Image (tube, rainbow, N blue to C red):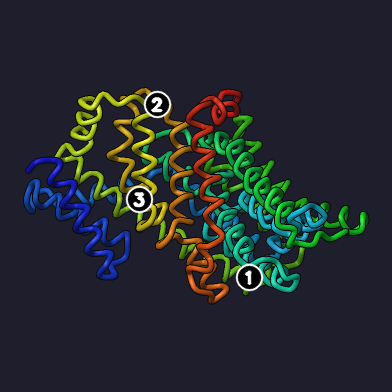
Amino acid sequence: MEPAFIGLLSAGLILFLLICGVWIGAALGIVGIIAFFLYGGWQAVPAVGHITFNCLTSYDFVSLPLFIFMATILANCGVSERIYAGSAAIFARFPGGLLHANVAGCALFASICGSTAATCAAMSTIALPELEKRGYPEAVSLGSLAASGTLGPLIPPSIGFIIYGVITETSIGQLFMAGIIPGIMLASLFMGYIFVRSLIKKDIKTEKKDFKETVLRLLSLWPVVVLFLLVIGTIYLGICTVVEAGSFGCVGALLVAIFFRQLTRKNLFEALRQGTNITVLIFFILLGGVILGHGLSNYGVPQYLLEMVIAAELSQYQFLGVLTIFYLILGMFLDGAAIMVVTLPIIFPVVSALGIHPVWYGVVMVLFCDLAAITPPVGVNLFVLQGITQKPLERIVKGIIPFILALLFVVLILVIWPWIPLILPNMMF
C-alpha cells in the first residue's frame, strides 16, 4: 500500500473512533495494531508486545510519575492557595489587578507542576471566587486563567518535555532549561496584554495592599522557590539526572507538607490517587501513540513525508509555517499529549533532516501543544474551566483569542531568534 494512503486511512480511522467515544490512547493503539496486521499479518502483531515493553521500561519515563506526585502532594497541602495569595499581594495594585495574579500564580505553580490542566484547575478554583466577588469582567478573567494554564508544560518541570525527550531521544535536562526563558516571555506577554487592556477600558479597580501583608505573603512562597531551585538547580549544575531530581522533588514536597502539618492520611491518599490517575492516562496515550508510530513507520510514512518536503524544496521557515497551520488545525480536535505522540515519530525525522535543533524544536512543539489546550472546540483548559464554572463554552472562548495571538507571537519570536531558548542549555555543566 502507498504511504500516503496508509497515512490518510489511519487518520480517518482515528477520527472515526474518537467520534464513537473511544478513548484517545485506545484509538491510537487500535489503529496501530491494524497497521501492523495489514503489514505482516498475525506474525507481525506480537511485535506490539515488544514495543509496549520497551516503551514502559524507559528509564527517563520514571521521572514522569515523580513530578506528577510532587505536584499532587503540594496541591493537596495548600501550596496553591499560598501561591495565589502571594501573587495577589504583589500585583493587585497594578492596572489589571488580580488578573496579573492569575498569570503569576500559574507561572509559579507551573514551576512545581508540568500539567496544563492541573495548573489551570488549581488556580481557577482559588481565583474565580475572588474575581467574581470584585466584579472583574468575565471574558478576560476566564481567558487569562485558561491561557495561563498553558505555562504548565513550558516552565519546568514539564510533562510535555519529558514525553518529547523520550520519543526523540533528546536530553530532558536541556529541554527543561530551554523552556524557562520562553515561559517567562509568554507570561510577560500575557501580563502586558492585561496591563494595556486595563488602561484602555478602565473597568478593573486596583487594590492597595499593606506593605507588611505583602512581605508576609511573599515569604509564604518559600516552598515553591526552594523546590524549584532544588529540582532545576541540581539538573542545571549537573549534580542530578532528571529522574534523581524528580525523586528529590517528591521528598521535598513531602517535607513541605509535614512542615505545614498537612500530611494527613487523607491528603496522602488523595495525592497518590490523583497522581496515579494522571500517570496512567498519560502512559495510555503514550503507548497508543508509540504503537501507531511504529505501525506507520513500517510503511515508510515518515520517509514519504521527508521526500515530499525535499521535492517541494521547502526552507526551514516555510516548513515551520506549514507545521504551525497543521498543528493549529490538529489542536482543535486532539489533546496536546496525543498530538505529540502521534506526530513526532513522523515529523521529527523531517525536522532532523532539515537541520533544525532538536531542543529548539522541543520548545516550539510544546508551544503548539499549549495552543491545543486553549483552541476550541476541544481545548482541555476550556473544558476544565467549564467544569469549574458551569458556564457555556462560548462564553469561555470569548476571552481567549488575544492570548492565542500572544502564543503565536512567541512562536514567531523563537523562529526569528532561535538562539533564545538555547541560552540556558548551552550554559549547562
Q: Earlier in the sequence, mark 3 or mark 1?
A: 1
Q: CA distance from mark 2 to mark 3?
A: 23 Å
Residue 160 spot, x, y in % from top left: 47, 47
Residue appearing at x 27%, y 67% in the figure: 19
Decide: few, some or many residues near mark 3? Use Cα within 10 Å; few <14, some 14-19, many ≥20. few
Do labels 3 and 1 touch, CB within 8 Å?
Answer: no
Local secondary structure at mark 3: helix
In the picture, the quarter occupied by the N terminus is top left
Residue occupied by mark 2:
356
Residue appearing at x 22%, y 35% in the figure: 305
Closer to the eye: label 1 or 2 = 2
Q: Which residue is more in the foreground, 287 or 347?
A: 347
Q: Which residue is more in the foreground, 350 or 141?
A: 141
Q: Which mark is residue 290?
A: none
Residue 188 spot, x, y in % from top left: 66, 43
Instruction: Tell me the amino acid under the disc marked 1.
Output: Asn
Above/below status of 314 relative to 327: above
Above/below status of 86 relative to 128: above
In the picture, the quarter occupied by the C terminus is top right
Residue appearing at x 12%, y 48% in the figure: 44
